Image (tube, helix red, strand yellow):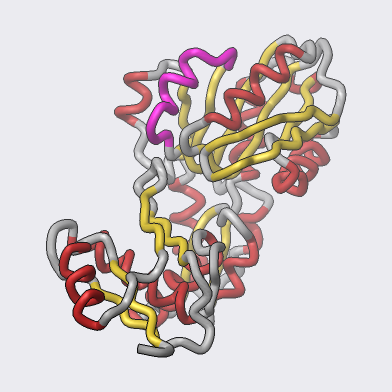
Amino acid sequence: MPNIVLFSGSSHHDLSQKVADRLGLDLGKVITKKFSNQETCVEIGESVRGEDVYIVQSGCGEINDNLMELLIMINACKIASSSRSRAPISAKLVANMLSVAGADHIITMDLHASQIQGFFDIAVDNLYAEPAVLQWIRENIPEWKNCIIVSPDAGGAKRVTSIADRLNVDFALIHKERKKANEVDRMVLVGDVKDRVAILVDDMADTCGTICHAADKLIDAGAVKVYAILTHGIFSGPAITRINSAPFEAVVVTNTIPQEEKMKACPKIQVIDISMILAEAIRRTHNGESVSYLFSHVPL
């Protein structure tokens, strides 16, 4: 049958195959999998431009996961993407879902990519952990005036330069070549960290391969101490084992994600409480006040 592509979700492959056999079709090429943090990933392995696409997915088993997988598959096919389907498609899809469900305003913190704000057709306030991070550095690292702020990848350069400027210290970055998600191939340090306290700063850490490799790289380059400060500590898979084995003085995260169990397994993890930032954002939003004050200040 011309101009038809039949895809199977992961809920009931046997049924999908029988439908395809009955129609005289081969099932379309699609990879459905989960990242270490259980985020759904869908990769459409062939062009669907100009085709009529049918997707077979059953409402059974892990129903919520299968529904999300179906939505991502639909969206991936709709924009005729052949391979890139994680961040841009999923984020736009979630933005649409929140809007359609009836949300009028989104308050969030340290989006992984700032352009995600543009996916919403409602008001978005993307708050920053930076003021709380600056306060923690000044209060907890005695040698902070001799520190260097380091980005574990080139994409975080803007974040670390902002913090370095506020502290009036230098910055460095690590260029990494990633073969596939959660796996880093090679890292190159750009900057001089010799005899200094290095503070790795990033918005999130999942399996922690990147920041742990970066910590080793910094120690090898002569750093006397290494800290990591992260907004969102996902810490999935081998993350805790890696952190325990890495040369960190501390791995500091905010409490946007619960960390109690992780802290029991890893004494290096410390938490910055950002509840007052969210509470003040809600108060200001409710009273019609600007939240821009929170971009550079921690509420008292």
What's the residue at 38%, 32% (across, down)? Answer: 237
In the depicted view, which residue is nearer to us: 11 or 138?
Answer: 11
What's the residue at 61%, 58% (across, down)? Answer: 113
Q: Quadrant of the C terminus?
A: top right
Percent x, y for residue 241?
Answer: 42, 19
Percent x, y for residue 176?
Answer: 70, 36
Q: Residue furthest front?
A: 24
In the depicted view, which residue is nearer to us: 127 or 94?
Answer: 94
In the depicted view, which residue is nearer to us: 169 or 54?
Answer: 54
Was residue 231 drawn as part of the magenta stretch in this picture? no
Q: Is residue 20 left or right of residue 95?
A: left
> Is 202 drawn above or below residue 285 in the view shown?
above
What's the residue at 56%, 63% (across, down)? Answer: 84
Q: Is residue 253 left or right of residue 70?
A: right
User: What is the magenta range?
Assistant: 235-248
In the depicted view, which residue is nearer to us: 88 or 122?
Answer: 88
Percent x, y for residue 220?
Answer: 74, 12
> Is 69 drawn above or below residue 172 in the view shown?
below
Q: Can you see residue 283? A: no
Percent x, y for residue 231?
Answer: 54, 42
